[in-house]
Structures are given as structure tokens and as C-alpha cells.
Image: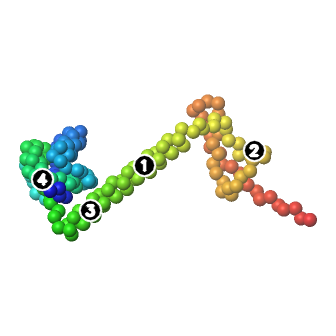
Amino acid sequence: MTRVRRYETMFILKTTIEPEICAKQIETIKANITTNGGEIEAVDDIGSKALAYEIDKNKRGYYFVIYFKAPTGSILELERLNNINENILRFIFIKFDTNKEIKNWDDMVAQTKNKKTEEQKEESKEEQIEATDTEVSAQPVSSEPVQANEPGATTTDESPKAVETTDESPKATKTTEPTPATPQKEEEV
């Protein structure tokens, strides 16, 4: 019986491939890990970065990290499958053995999971803001002209604002300055 250990694999994909193919390559690597007895704990999509040196005429690479548990015998097969894949520029498998290394691995997995949940929260906030913006812009606008000195109208703002009135023709628009509101005098008793 083989022992299950903790591993980290980092691989660099070519940036010249299309994003759909890149996503398929990542899913293939994940599937290779799970079919060889591995259990994926966390995934960190680092993104496109400049390489330290040119690899096969590539100056940039798409970095990806997977934290997983797997039997020790499966790593040779995973390395073989990564060597065959022409879209992978470089890869590395790191084994975590000692108690200190295992604790560090657990910390890195937790950080990656926290990072992912924070990104999801940010995305949901942005979606909520966009939904609110579309709701506000979708509200009907009154086509009635605004009257500056309408009886019964109250103003809470002391600053004068421009009032826009429209004629019956859709092209004509007039802008007039309102008269400043005069303060009401209190009655003396």
C-alpha cells in the first residue's frame, strides 16, 4: 500500500494559446491528478506573468498552482503526462514530508481558499452594484416640465439650481435659472 502525501504542483502554460484551450489544459491536469488517486485541496490561479528567462521563445507564461494529496506512486505518472503536454512550458512537484512542512502546506491551502472566497465576495459586490445601476437607469423619467415657482412646492435646498423645461417639439430645450428663494419673515406677536 502506498502512502498518501501532500503535494504542491506549479506549472506554466504558454500564453500563446487561446483562453478556452488554457482552461481545458488546466481541467485536464486536474483530471489527471484525480484519476491517479489524488484529491485536490486548493487551486490558485496566479495569472500571466513575465518569465525570468525565455523558454521556447516564450517571454510570458500563465502560472497555476494546485495543492493536492496523492499516493507517492502517482507522481511519476503525473510527471510523464505533464512532459507529454506541449502547452506546459515548465512544471514542478513539491512533496511536503515533515510536520513543519505539512503545517506550512495546510497554511498555504487555507490562504488560497480565503483568497478565493474574498475574490468571490468582491465579484458578487460588483454584480450587485451593476444590478443597482441598471435598476436606477431603468426607472421611468417624468416627461412633465418642471415648474420653478409652483404653488405648494417646498424646497429644502438653499442653493439655486438650473431648471430645465421642454417645449412640445423634441429638439427644443430651454434652461432657465430659478429665482433665489426669499426667506419667509416670522410674524411678530
In screen coordinates, is 27 left or right of 145? left
In the picture, the disc for residue 50 is none
Q: Nearer the viewer, mark 3 or mark 2?
A: 3
Looking at the image, residue 86 sits to the left or right of residue 109; the answer is: left
* Mark-to-mark CA distance, 1 and 3: 27 Å
Q: Which type of secondary structure does the marked residue at label 3 adopt? A: helix
Q: Which residue is mark 1?
A: 124
Amino acid type, label 1: Ser
Few, some or many C-alpha atoms within 10 Å of disc 2 (few <14, some 14-19, many ≥20)? few
- Name the residue carrying label 2: 150
Viewport quadrant of the C terminus: bottom right
Q: Compute the Cα span from label 3 to label 2.
A: 69 Å
- For the residues marked 3 and 4, what is the alpha-carbon distance in whole angstroms? 24 Å
- Residue 82 position, x and y percent, is 11, 47
Mark 2 or mark 1, which has the lower sequence index?
A: 1
* Residue 91 image offset from top left, x and y in percent: 13, 53
- x, y percent for residue 167: 64, 34
The three-letter code of the residue at mark 2 reads: Glu
Q: How is the image coloured?
A: rainbow
Tag 4: amino acid? Met
Indicate which disc, 1 or 3, sits on the residue closer to the N terminus.
3
At 16% from the left edge and 64% from the top edge, which residue is drawn? Answer: 97
> Which element is circle 1 on?
helix
Task: Point out the residue furthest to the bottom here.
Answer: 100
Asked if the residue at tag 3 contacts the one at tag 1, i.e. Cβ–Cβ closer than 8 Å, the answer is: no
Residue at x 10% of width, y 45% of height:
81
Task: Locate residue 166: give its quadrant.
Answer: top right
Q: Residue furthest front?
A: 1
Residue for badge 3: 106
The CA distance from mark 2 to mark 1 is 44 Å
The numbered mark, 3 or 2, whose residue comes first in the sequence reads 3
Q: Quadrant of residue 85?
A: top left
